[in-house]
Image (cartoon, rainbow, N blue to C red):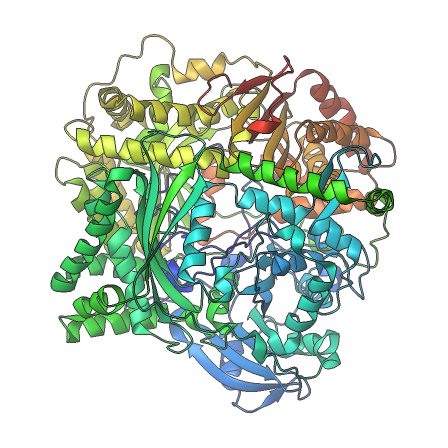
Amino acid sequence: RRLTRRVRRTTRTDSHARAYTHIARLMRATTTACVARGASIGRVILNKRANHHRKLSSSTLASRREVMIGTGAAVVGTNAAIATGGANGASAVVEPVSASGMLDALEALPVGSTLAKGAFVVTSVQRVKPYDVVAVELEHVRTGAKLLHVGADDSNACFNVAFRTTPRDSTGVAHVLEHTVLCGSEKYPVRDPFFNMLRRSLSTFMNAMTASDFTCYPFSTMNKVDYSNLLGVYLDACFFPKIKEGDFSQEGHRFEFATMDDPKSDLIYKGIVFNEMKGAMGSQSARFGRELGANLFPTSTYHWNSGGDPVNIPDLTYEQLKAFHALHYHPSNAKFYTYGDLPLEETLQQIEDLALNRFDRLDVSKLIVEDEQRFKAPQAVEVTVPADAIVADANKQSIISLAWLMVNQIKDPVSLENFALNVAGDLLTSGPQSYFYEALLEPGLGSGFAPGTGYGGSRRETSFAVGLKDVAEADLKKVETTILEVLERISREGFPRDRVEAVMHQVELDAAVVTTQFGLYAGFGAFSTWVHDGDSLRSLRTPELAAKLNAALDADPQFWQKLIKKWFLDNTHRLTVTARTDPDYDKKLDEAEKKKLKSIEATLTEEQKAKIVANALALKENQDMKEDVSILPTLVVSEAVPKEIKKWGSKDMKIAKGIPLQYDEQPTNGVAYFTTHFSLDGLPERLVPYLDLFCEFIDQVGTEKMKYKDLAEKIKLKTGGFSVESVLRPIADGKGTPTVSLAIGSPALERNVDDMFEILTDLQTAKWRGEEDRLKLLISRKAASLGSSVGSNGLQYARSLSAAQINASSAFANELTGLPYVALVTRLSKENAIEEAQSALSEIAAFALRPERVQRCRIACQSESFPAVERALSRFLGDIKPAAASPNATGSTLESKLKSFKPELSKMFITIPGQTNYCSTSVPALPYTHPDAPALFLLAQALSAGYLHREIREKGGAYGGGAVSDPMSALFQFFSYRDPNTTKTLETFVKSVEWATTPGSITSKELEEAQLRAFKALDAPLAPSSRGKSGFNTGFTDAQRQHFRDGLLACSPEDIARAAREHLAPAMKTSSAVAIIGSSEAAPRDDSSWIVRDPLGATN
């Protein structure tokens, strides 16, 4: 859990993840509902080592094994290496096979040769040098199943199997099936093998996902035995599931009475997917995006909501579900993906023996997704969507977007135009210098781009959309006209080459950055075309296509003009979607649902009512039944988990007149990373609420040397974007006051390090005054963004709100990024309080950006880069000059505010539009070095897996819930999300503690599973750029980290039960704070013990 907020801007600040980069859209596997197991397939860019026309020494190149072994401390700062090999994951001494030898052997495989005793035939072999991997394509001889293996020097081995799933309605059949197949299989007939394996494994990733035209089942792990275990469970689930009717009713939908055993109570719908999709579709953004896609694809499978529309989900029958599985989940319709350094033939043989040898080839031609029928003339539609939770201007609520259907990625599999349109999409919409930003946002026609804006390649045919939200009715036509005028101008003038170079620099940097899940994302990037028998190597072609685009631009000065004319101006498949908002949108859905249920209830016979009651009771009995899951494979903690923490060898030194410098020598592949912390001790309390705005805007306003557009372009051309965040350094023993720093950092290619620090020096002169129009636009856009985020990020806000009542560090985090921040920015925008913002932001700059406030610095790079980076950092530190006199620090300060914090406990309900709820209860916990902190940490894992999952998800119908103990902030939290319940869930939180304190609840099995869950989180893979960063931020010593790890390993079931009895149970009775963000209809207005407010704090 982070108490800091990382600012995300158009220049991309999240340098080690890059999940939101512009070129990511080329490989995007974005879905209508990638929602089944708590994660979505987002935009991905493959970051890995690549030469990029520069000579690198052997020490520069990052071995993927180095990348993956060794781990991070996202939760509590504890790092450790993962053991691989041996029985049950025990460490084993194995003669190493060289990475180059393994890759050479794969490359030498002859096309036409067979593997796995003739079961698979090699159809293609290609070495992809920029990423130093070998791609081997194979076909299963008997069934025609396709398999892509990407061999790499990477121990984080991945597996994924995808089925083309082509719904013809919005009942969510593919999504419900994705849930249901994981509820028990032929070899593992337990109720929920998937969630059981989550706590019996050290997987670095486990999920299942439903996209608009495929469903996939991925996992990754660094443990060889774990890989084999998970592979067996996944194969059995996909190909031999039980698909029991009871599981369908639990996961999909069912009738129940409000009081389960009382047929006189109201008839209701229940079901996990049903409620999940109420939450998923419960925002303006989701509803508009769905309308955009449905109308752009009126005749193909993309017209339908593959995740399921809650209005239509109850129409799905059990028989339809089984028939869908029989047709779609067949090897002839499957695409297998494997990645890493595990022997290919062993994996192939396991796939053959456990699944494929039981099937024959099936004709799946009827599953082919037909091309969309192209419009003969542009079309226009009008739709209705929900209003945002916070409306900035009641007279400006409409949305308008123009969309075009573009490249057929199956008929043109390696399309330069497809890649070029991706680049064009960035130039059109990314950053303040982009064409549509200048033409649409700067004049104030809307508050931000419409949902769905950008270039999308997740379907077999690509698309581009651009538009605005929060538009006045009178300006709708002007927005449409302006968009077309901009495109007309570009068709005449093209794009300036220097702007294109800035985008191409980002492509180069993205490919150079070493990440932890390269293999996983490579698979995701392949599926959106490969499932249609298109290009399987799509996600590995970025450097190749970038080079081709540069060559095309050199050869044809009219390249961009022709591209824009062909795909935009002459493209008749253009759609204009105009949306008006309805503040009662969700209320009307609820009323229609109740009316429908009342109508159904009126027709029910006594016998039918009795059957509904009997089915509900039978399901509950099944959910309550204690199962023997020993049939499932598992790792053993004593064998699979290392006892020692991982030490990164950080070097502490001094720089620039004694400033502490931490140097982390790591194989960062030619990219250098730096971070500087400025102390915020003494910051006037009145400025604290504006800190996040300062972090957000510091590189979005102009400087003394550059206007803001030129600055944005230079940042894009020379760096990976600047990360600016407030960092709270916790106190390990809880005895003292945490300190806060302003952290500024950035990555850059080695050749651009001097430019990076030059830009950073210039940022100190940010023009907080004299740019009133710019600041007004930034604030209005931020206000609109925050207003729409309350519904979609309800869980984050609920947890932050409940935690803020417990301790100082959580209160600080809530003020900076929670609902108080939403209220502040909304007020600044509504009142046009630009002078207030200018004064606060300029005072923060004058206070923080001073040479005497530099606390510490960090550099992460390879050894040969360090001297140059150190020299550049020293120059930067010497060039720090205060922009103005430091503000008067009389009165309360940030430090005194943290020190004087007093808990104020309450129960708060924040009302928002929507049909589901987000619940959170927070209580004080134990600090990091407390002897019982490890037991409390494991207790949260045991509660989540052993009690809360069953009660909140399976019985309650919520999409999810759990508990977390955070020793860094001495906080224990319970939570649920996309939950149809409110106070019932709060009661479940209390009952879970009673369960934990009951003798016999926490057994050696629960302990072992809790430890595996804990170490999976603590020992997650860590990229080279982040190794040592946790210690730099927290200040925790290796001895403290080892002590916490020892405590986790030494815990007994009795220790966990005692922690529940002595620490958690008393806190729940006397020191709990509750927050719910949810449907206005569910608010407990008649209960005086609750405070009911809207998101801005007004009584509701």
Tell me the quarter of the image containing the N terminus. top right
Residue 670 occupies which quadrant of the picture? bottom left
Q: Is residue 780 visible from the viewing direction of this image?
A: yes
* Residue visible at 65% across and 61% down in the picture: 223
Residue name at image x 72 percent, y 67 percent: 232
Between 596 and 170, the one lying in front of the other is: 596
Q: Is residue 367 left or right of residue 47?
A: right
Toward the viewer: 716 or 42?
42
Would residue 754 be seen by someone viewing this image from the given angle?
A: no
In the rendered image, the vertical position of residue 869 relative to residue 332, given as above or below:
above
- In the displayed structure, 245 sits above or below 712; it is below
Residue placed furthest toward the top? 891
Work out whether residue 499 or residue 330 is closer to the camera in this orientation and state it.
Answer: 330
Residue 539 placed where, x, y %? 43, 68
Percent x, y of residue 653? 38, 39
Quadrant assignment, res 1087: top right
Q: Position of residue 290 (x, y in %)?
A: 46, 52
Q: Is residue 922 above or below residue 603?
A: above
